[in-house]
Image: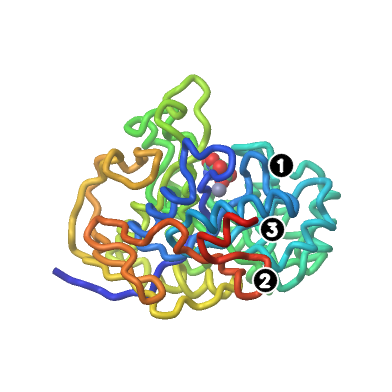
Amino acid sequence: MTSLRLPGLIDPHVHLREPGATYKEDFDTGTAAALAGGFTCVLDMPNNQPPITDVATLQAKQAAACAKARCDYGLYLGAGVDNILTAAALADRVVGLKCYLDQTFGPLRLDTLEALVQHAERWPRERPLLVHAEGRSMAAAILVAQLTGARLHICHVSRAEEIDLIRRARDKGLTVTCEATPHHLFLTAADAATIGAGRSEVRPRLADARDRAALRAHLALIDCFATDHAPHTTAEKDSANPPPGFPGLETALPLYLELVREGLLTLDELLARTVYNPQRIFNLPEQPNTWIEVDTEAEWVVRGAELYTRARWSPFEGWRLRGRVLRVVLRGRLAYENGNVLAPPGSGRDVRAATDANSLTSGEECKDR
Ligand code: NCD
Ligand code: ZN
């Protein structure tokens, strides 16, 4: 056995579905899946029902997370056409502002260029402005960030033309950061034949082998790895109208380690993308006395039914993966060991709690909100 001690991983892009769709996932099951996958901190997206766009919706979500999360977390705010001033005023309580420039799951969509420019102008410079922006939308987002000085972070880059655009922006000295998902690094549209048509629906869509090769060839440009853990039930995925999204928290680390085994990254470069760059880009506090222990050689077969995510399926079903989390210690307490999640609901902390007197930290306090 090759046991390796690593810092707790950070996933900067998850959808834990609370409030509004807790039958798909909630802060309890989603953070259990995170710990099982070796993540001690997850940053949760705002495309909930209702979307997280103002103080009332943010407080409701903070209360749910505070009461139920088993690992640390940060929350994003969503950009709409009518919350430009409200969003900027809430910047200190969240880890970033998410702008959906393309169609995806949920109602949150920033349709006008004017609203994007206004958010980019108002949102504090030192905080990241995240975009779901594919193809031409990505080009627009890069220009708007350049013109306004906003700190742009591009979510889930998936295509050759997109990573090429980011390379060109970097070559010109623009400070744009980006992330890539395990599914875009390991799957292509051709895998729909085995995954199933509805189950393989995801945004951005699975691309072709050339796109996947371009991402793998340009890992140096990719600042973070992010699962975009987006659980939906198997009934929904197998229906006539399948929603896009994959669960990913429990299969990510062995896939990331595969990139190291393939010689595409060093272990230090992997840790930059899963710990240190996310810490820096999203202004996250260090997690003291926090680490994970991984058996890098342990092989296991992905079985959706055995996962902690409430979705209980995986696009990597049946894959033989190498690398298993043995133990997770979060702030000095054993949080996960040999398949068992030990951290109770409510033990996770909001990464903005220390800077925000309004963020609560214990299960009891959460109820008073
Ligand atoms: C996400 C979801 O289901 O919330 N779906 C997806 O396919 N990635 C939305 C998103 O991240 O765009
Ligand atoms: Zn997402």
Q: Is mark 2 within 8 Å of ligand 2?
A: no
What residue is shown at x 36% (from left), y 76% (from top)? 332
The amino acid type of the residue labelled 1 equals Arg
* Most distant residue in the left direction: 1
Check disc 3: other Cα within 10 Å, few if <14, some if 14-19, many if 20+: many
Q: Secondary structure at mark 2?
A: loop
Q: Is residue 335 left or right of residue 114?
A: left
Q: Which residue is mark 3?
A: 97
Quadrant in which the C terminus is drawn: bottom right
Closer to the camera in the image, 352 or 297: 352
Check disc 1: other Cα within 10 Å, few if <14, some if 14-19, many if 20+: many
Mark 3 or 2 closer to N-term?
3
- Report how far apart the C-alphas of labels 3 and 1 lie in the structure: 13 Å
Q: Which residue is mark 1?
A: 109
The amino acid type of the residue labelled 3 equals Leu
Image coordinates of residue 305 in percent, x first then y, are: 28, 38
- Report how far apart the C-alphas of labels 2 and 1 lie in the structure: 31 Å
Closer to the camera in the image, 86 or 194: 86
What residue is shown at x 71% (from left), y 42% (from top)? 109
Q: Secondary structure at mark 3?
A: strand
- Report how far apart the C-alphas of labels 3 and 2 lie in the structure: 20 Å
Image coordinates of residue 79 in percent, x first then y, are: 74, 51
Q: Nearer the viewer, mark 3 or mark 2?
A: 2
Closer to the camera in the image, 366 or 154: 366
- Label count reads 3
On the question of residue 222 being in view, the answer is no
Q: Which residue is mark 2?
A: 357
Mark 2 or 1 closer to N-term?
1
Q: Secondary structure at mark 1?
A: loop
On the question of residue 91 being in view, the answer is yes
Residue 188 vertical placement versus 145 (above, below): above
